[in-house]
Structure formats: C-alpha cells, structure tokens
Image (cartoon, helix red, strand yellow):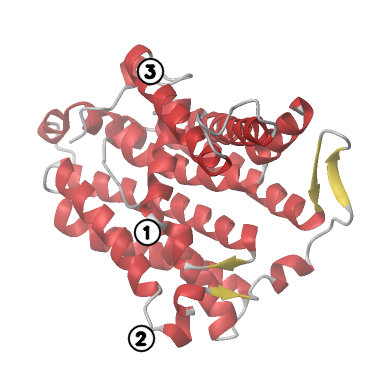
Amino acid sequence: MDVGQMFSLALQQGLGPTAIVYALAAIGLNIHFGYTGLLNFGQAGFMAVAAYGLSSIVYTWSLPFWLGLIVGLAVSVVLALLLGVPTLRLRADYLAIVTIAAAEIIRQTLGSVTLLKYFGGQDGLNQFTASFSSINPYSGRFGVPGVVTWSAYDFWVMTVGWVLVGLTCLMTYLLMRSPWGRVLKGIREDEDAVRSLGKNVYAYKMQSLIIGGLFGALAGFMIALRSAAINPSFFATDVTFFAYTVLLLGGAARVFGPVAGAIIFWFLITFLDVFFSQATQENLIPDSIMTGTQASLIRFMFMGLALMLLMIYRPQGIFGDRRELALDAR
C-alpha cells in the first residue's frame, strides 16, 4: 500500500477548497448553534441562493461579477428574514423543521424545468468564473513537490478562501467578545432571563440568523468558484449535516473550532477512502468482506462511529469547552 499517496491525497483535501467551503459553512452554524443555540438545518439553502445568485447574474444576465456577489449576499439576507420572522418566536424545533424544508424546497426549485432558462435545471450553470480567473496572479503548480500540489486556479481559490476564513474568524472573535456577543450567549443559556433584563431576544436571534447566513453565503460562493460550475446536487441535505459534523468535531462555540474540524474531517475521510480502496484493490481485504464499491462507503461508517464516540466521551468536541456546550437549544 502506498502510504505516501494516502497522506498526499488526504492533505490535499484537508487544506483544499472543499475544506474551505465546509469551514465557512460551519463558522456560520457556529454563530447560529454554538453561540445562540439556534437549530438551523438549512445552511445548504443559504449556500445555494448565494451561489445561484452569483452564477445566474453573471451567466444568465451577463452582468458584472461583483454585482453577482452583492446579489448573492442580499438574497441570503432575504432568506434569513423569510425563515426567521415566523419561527424565531417559537421553540427551536420549529426553526429546525422550517430550515431543512426550505433548503430542500430551494434545491428542487432551482433544478426545476420551469426555471430552466434562468438556473439551468438539473445541469446547473457554468462559465461564470472568467472575471475571477482573469485576476489570478498564479501560474504553474503550487505546493510541496512530492507531497501535495495544486493547480494555479485551485491555489487561487484556496488563497481567497483561506483569507475569507481568517476574516470570518476574526469577525466572530470580535463579535463574541462584544456586549452583543455576550447577549447571544445569554440567549443560548436562558433566553427568558435575557428577556427579563429588557433585551429584545427576537431581534438578537434574527441578527444572529442573518450573520450566520451571510457566512453560509460565502461558503456558497466558494463552492461555485471551486468547481467553476454549480448544479442542485451540490446543495443536498448532507451538506448541512457534514457542516454540523465539522462543527461538532472541532468544537462548537470556539472561534477556530469549525476550521480545525473541517481540516481534520476532510483529511480523515479522504485517508480512509484511499486506504480501503487500495486495500481492496491489492486483495488485502478479500471480496467476501468488502468489495471495491463498498470501500468508498465504509469511510462514512468509521466517521459515524468516531463521531458517536466523540459525543459520548467528549461532547464539546476536540477543542471545545464543556461549559460552552449548546445542546439545550431554544
């Protein structure tokens, strides 16, 4: 077995554009769930409206790239308002139900035949990254030769992506150490107590939902730029669940928890994928136990088992603090 190849491919995914997408999505969920206690199961919906806002503005209407970014962010704010207005005065389970349903409604609507000329149906959209590629300062390949390398475009996406991750982490750090952030933590712990102090809990929850949704919109931009194309399958329900896995793995209510979780998650899941694929190809694992087709799926079983054990023995995550745990969301 080629351990070097396993490590190289795992490192490529752990530091690459995919990890960046989930780090940004999980940072948004950290604002929602980790700090405020909001159960948003529709982060994929925020990602989808932002990605399609950008791509459709550029490809369908032939308008500037920067305008697509503005439209994507604006639509994510509108979505947060539409989801939050009827649900944030209610219990957390109502928000969870509404958000997961809304994300799926958005995905099915974007892929519908009725809107084919605007959003490309199930085939999606492409050819909207020319403006982004034109300012790429890199050429050739980058990385550590013999260990891990990326193409010039991927490295440009990574540069922009990790800068965004750094800026969102800095913003989270500053917000959560402000009076506003302390109110959010109070809402997470006991919103009735915060309300008794004269704070408008509903307004704070709405602000949290909007900010976390905007971070999710950045993840949507990155998923569109990463592939230079989008289609509805990019925003299935498992995207949100993976983002939650990343958050819980690194540690909720920790500024760098989602970032560490994204790197660890994609490193491990890629390493396991390559390990079991090579093991079946070289007959180290006989077909009677596992076939090559099953090898690509067994990684999720191991990651699921690892997550279960983590929740049992360290529910706050690898870098989390038990005192900040927000499982009793309201």
Residue 10 left/right relative to 289? right
Q: Which residue sits at x=49%, y=80%?
A: 120
**2 or 3: tag closer to the N-terminus:** 2
Residue 131 left/right relative to 289? right
**1 or 2: tag closer to the N-terminus:** 1
| Residue type beneath disc 1 | Gly
Query: Looking at the image, is 249 positioned above or below residue 243?
Result: above
The reply to whether discs 1 and 2 touch (Cβ–Cβ < 8 Å) is no
* For discs 1 and 2, the disc positioned in front in the rendered view: 2
Kind of element beneath mark 2: loop
Q: Which mark is residue 45?
A: 1
Q: CA distance from mark 2 to mark 3?
A: 46 Å
Q: CA distance from mark 3 to mark 1?
A: 29 Å
Q: Quadrant of residue 264?
A: top right
Q: Which mark is residue 309?
A: 3
**Residue 81 image position (x, y, % from top left):** 27, 61
* For discs 3 and 1, the disc positioned in front in the rendered view: 3
- The residue at the far top in this view is 313
Q: Which mark is residue 114?
A: 2
Residue 103 left/right relative to 262? left
**Residue 252 image position (x, y, % from top left):** 39, 28
